[in-house]
Image: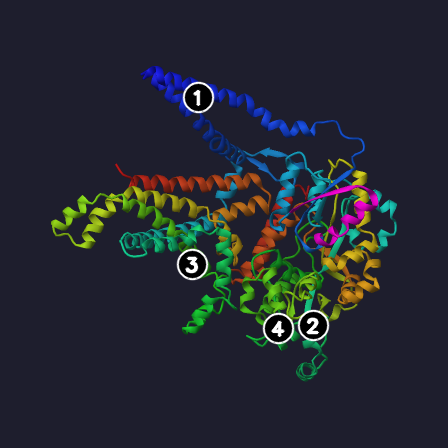
Amino acid sequence: MKQSKREAFVYLVPGLLFLFVIFVIPLAYAVGISFFRWTLIRPDLGIRFVGIRNYITILGDPFTWETMGRTLLFVVGAVLVEMTIGTAISLALNLNYRGHNIVQSVFLVPFMMAPIVVGFAWRFLLNNTFGPVPQLFRGIGLGNLVEIPLLANPDTVLLMLIIVDIWQFTPFVVLVVLAGMKALPAEPFEAAVVDGANAWQRFWQITVPLLRPSLLVAVVIRTLTALRIFDTVTIMTGGGPGSASEVLSYYGYRTAFQSYEMGLAGTIGILTMVVSLIFTIFYIQKVGVE
Amino acid sequence: MKRRNRKNLSKMLLVGVIMLLLAPYSLFAGGEQEAQAPDEEAPAVVRLVSERGSHTEAWKTRMEGFEAETGIDLELTQHPYANYFDQLMLNFTGGQSGFDVPYVSMLWYPALAKAGYIQPLNEIVEANPELADDMPGLVNASIDGKLYFIPYMNEVGGVVYRTDLFNDPLERKNFKAKYGYDLMPPKTLEQYRDIAEFFHRPPELYGVTLMGKRSIFLATHFMNRLWARGGNLLGDDMQPIFDSEIGITALKEAKDMFAFANTAALSYDFQEALTEFKMGKSAMAELWTTAMFHVSDPESSQVVGNASFVGFPKPADAQSEKRPRLYISWGFAVASDAENKEAAIDWIEYAIGDKQLAEASPTGTIPTRLSALEDRVLLEELPWLEPFQEALGSCIPTPIVPLIPEGMTMVNQFIAPAVSEYLAGNMSAEAALQEAAQKTHDLLKENGYYD
């Protein structure tokens, strides 16, 4: 027994070492730097230990909380819709019909596009002069909604980013949930049919509980990646108009590469990580399988 | 089973040990080649680093001639503009720059000089004293008497306008009837506004193209007017003064001009603004001078031969005064750890020769030497250089950000968001500028400017 435990440990060492190098060390560095004031463009000022002052500065700034609020609004809005629509699409794609493989492949195209390409493409689609979306609005008599460009209107810009995110990442949810559906056993459904359960009852009381592991994977991964959205914000809005589309990751980027305050940027990174952890723990406790 | 497991484990361990022993050889194999004794007859090499832009393409045309003339090899590494400065900083802070001559924006060199990443180049002006009068941009290239930056290209803030519209007899007649004076390239802020209003005929034609996306470009619309009205970003005591009455007026004027622009301009960056003007959708565009290269490109522009440039207007009562005007320059510096400073200086002196500047200019750069700007062949090819020369000569060339390391932060992090907030209607002009000024004050105080 002792021998096999030792052997098992030896087999685990390379993987643990790899995890330590690519995860623990950078994390420790990020945490460490958040206790220092390091202005990259002023190396003459040195790297000064400031204790928790960076945390006080960031957490005491109302702008941080406004940005956090915008980020959470984005995450909840995008992920909720992606999970709902994604699951519905998975149900439809789970049927056997002619050409269902082609349909599945087409659905995945947005997910395969690089976020930066998605940003440029949607910037074009929403362009107020020649973009097809505003022209469609004008064509159906809703031109007043696009008098101010959708990406330049503080009331609509976050919604546009949510829509772009839904367009791009719903296929990911479809992929994960569909894979889960393919692995579901047939017997519970057959028994339910025999017992007289209708389609909605079968879906809500059999499909959803059995799909919990897949749904958990999809919602956790989507939440964590939505919290880190950066490319589309940078390309489409630059955080504007004003700060109407500034999210945590872009705030961290500006602090690091426009203010060159690395300590403060590290603090924002830790804050983002803490928010991600809270979401993950919440999901696992509420949605996780026993 | 146990014996088989032990055998497998031993094999794995043996393979792992062999790999560990071999790994250092593969890691350092290249290094060993570099460690060979240098060949005494190998030519000197100057390592250049730059972004991918039109003026880089311009001085690249000079590289072959330099190599043939001097026997010095040039190696160039280029990065996309978007992350070029980040890449430079990462290289410098890594301890070894890896290059000799970085081609940088004038806005960057103060931070690089203060950090000790680039070295003084006073010997260039000492060896070429005519540069002091011939190169106006040199006044912004020194810190405490030490010259760190040699301007290669420059441009001023101004207005690109449609000469076909301005010269059209019917347009001229109608303009005079409405405003009481002749239609001409705007010299005053009042004329600029009138002309924008006159030509604003959406959706076929817009009076002016502006850049409304939150960025340093948007900030220039505020700064152009701030300087034209005699204001500035920082006072002599380094205190922010842009939240003055002049600043508030300038910011409000900037927003008012958007009334004569495409509503889409609220989300435009430089490229989109340039595209709108090139497509012939606007009568004027508030851009930099190098936009004229793109406007004159027959492959992408529909207004070739129908555009020119004028320096940013001033108030009517300040026409005889020299006021600050947005001045943008890129040029050469020499890294402090440059392996061959003399060869690096040879390249810089060659590239900024007036003949070299004039010959390279049509590729996409505007010479920084007045003697090069008077080149007759060049002026025939780029006639808009004449009004550019006038614009440069009639202003105080003023960098878009104060030439301190915190300058970029001031404009990118404080002023640009403030202008964007005001434009979006989230804050009043006074509140937006006061907030930006307070943040500027706090930053400069923290970094020791008021001690």
Mark 3 belongs to which amino acid?
Answer: Leu
Q: Residue sitting at 69 percent across and 76 percent down?
A: B164
Tell us which disc is closer to us: 3 or 2: 2
Residue B310 inside the magenta-drawn segment: no
Of all chains, the one bearing label 1 is: B
Q: Nearer the viewer, mark 3 or mark 1?
A: 1
Residue depicted at x 81% and y 46%: B68
Which one is in front, B348 or A154?
A: B348
- Which amino acid, by three-letter code, is at mark 2? Asn
Q: Residue B12 got which mark?
A: 1
Q: Is residue B8 left or right of residue A210?
A: right
* Chain at numbered mark 4: B
Label 2 and label 1: CA atoms lie apart by 75 Å
Which of these two is toward me, B197 or A229? A229
For residue B207, the mark is 4
Element under disc 1: helix
Which residue lies under the disc numbered 2? Answer: B306
Task: Determine crowd level at label 4: few under 14, some 14-19, many 20+ residues with C-alpha closer than 10 A.
Answer: many
Q: Quadrant of the N terminus of chain B?
A: top left
Q: Give the numbered dot on residue B388.
A: none
Q: Please indicate whether residue A119 sits to the left or right of residue B298 in the image.
A: left
Amino acid type, residue under disc 1 in the picture: Met
Discs 3 and 1 share one subunit: no
Q: CA distance from mark 3 to mark 4?
A: 31 Å
Residue holding disc 3: A159
Where residue A113 appears, x then y in whole percent?
A: 46, 52
Question: Cα distance, mark 3 to mark 1?
Answer: 55 Å
Residue kind at label 4, given as amino acid type: Gly
